Image (tube, rainbow, N blue to C red):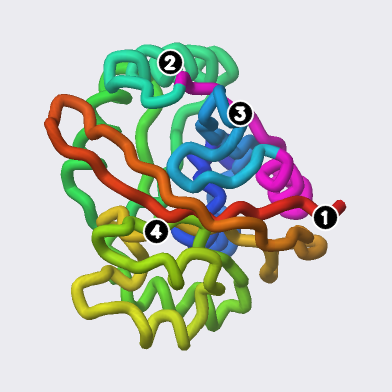
Amino acid sequence: MKEKVVFNWSGGKDSMLALHKVLEEDRLEVVTLLTTLNEKYDRISMHGVRAKLLEQQADRLGIPLRKILLPEMADMETYTRIMGEETTFWKAQGITAFLFGDLFLEDIRAYREKQLAGSGIRPEFPIWQYGTRKAAHDFIHLGYKAILTSVDASKLNETFAGRHFDEKLLSDFPEDVDPCGENGEFHSFVFDGPLFSKPVQFKKGKTIHKTYQLQDKNVSSGFYFTDLEPTE
């Protein structure tokens, strides 16, 4: 019997590549995709993707979805508390591992390991140290399709928001932009690929600019968001 695990799911390409690898290895059973959403806007946190599209994505993948609603601009104390409660819930369901699509950020991995320490649930990182350029090309060559839903305005201009994640996009990225956006340069939404029963249908809406005040810092950060509107 395969070990049952929960996937901390963003809806983006890194999560998709990690899920593909896990299912290909056939060692674990992913029982649920776990996604945090902005409670005020009902959208995936930082990706800006509507909950309805996330639900359709999970349906096309054939894996149950569990949504966690977070207050807008939740501080780390609130986030840690909510995720701690979620960990306790899944431990009671017999889950022994959480999966993450992180690639190389040591501080993020350390944070996840610290928060799960002693909980009875271990973190797993299926594509850790995969290599971001290889990950980007492999994602495309496997036949997955994604679109950039948000970009960091300090790294990329407005024209990158709403573009498809393909080889042309990779060649157009400035040299200081990670091919997978691992430093937060951009976020994406996967809408089709080998594991999908059929594509998620949508149309591109408006692209807007939003500025966020960074917690504990007297600086702000701007992002361009391209809205994706469900068409079914």
Answer yes or no: do the residues labelled 3 and 1 have beta carbons within 8 Å? Answer: no
The residue identified by callout 2 is: 82
| Local secondary structure at mark 4 | strand
**Nearer to us in this view, 139 or 122:** 139
Q: Earlier in the sequence, mark 4 or mark 2?
A: 2
Instruction: Name which quarter of the figure residue 4 lies in.
Output: top right
Instruction: Tell me how far mark 1 sits from mark 2, CA to CA.
Output: 33 Å
| Local secondary structure at mark 1 | loop
Which residues are drawn in magenta?
52-71
Instruction: Name which quarter of the figure residue 43 lies in.
Output: top right
The residue identified by callout 4 is: 151
| Local secondary structure at mark 2 | helix
Indicate which disc residue 135 carries. none
**Above or below: residue 215 compared with residue 208:** above
Extreme-right residue of the structure: 232
The amino acid at mark 2 is Ile
**Above or below: residue 222 compared with residue 51:** below
**Above or below: residue 223 compared with residue 3:** below
Residue sitting at 35 percent across and 68 percent down?
A: 157
Q: Earlier in the sequence, mark 4 or mark 1?
A: 4
Residue sitting at 26 percent across and 33 percent down?
A: 213
Q: Residues within 10 Å of mark 1 (few under 14, many from 20)?
A: few
Q: Earlier in the sequence, mark 3 or mark 1?
A: 3
Query: x, y (%) of residue 130?
Result: 32, 67
Residue sitting at 44 percent across and 81 percent down?
A: 169
The residue identified by callout 1 is: 231
The amino acid at mark 1 is Thr
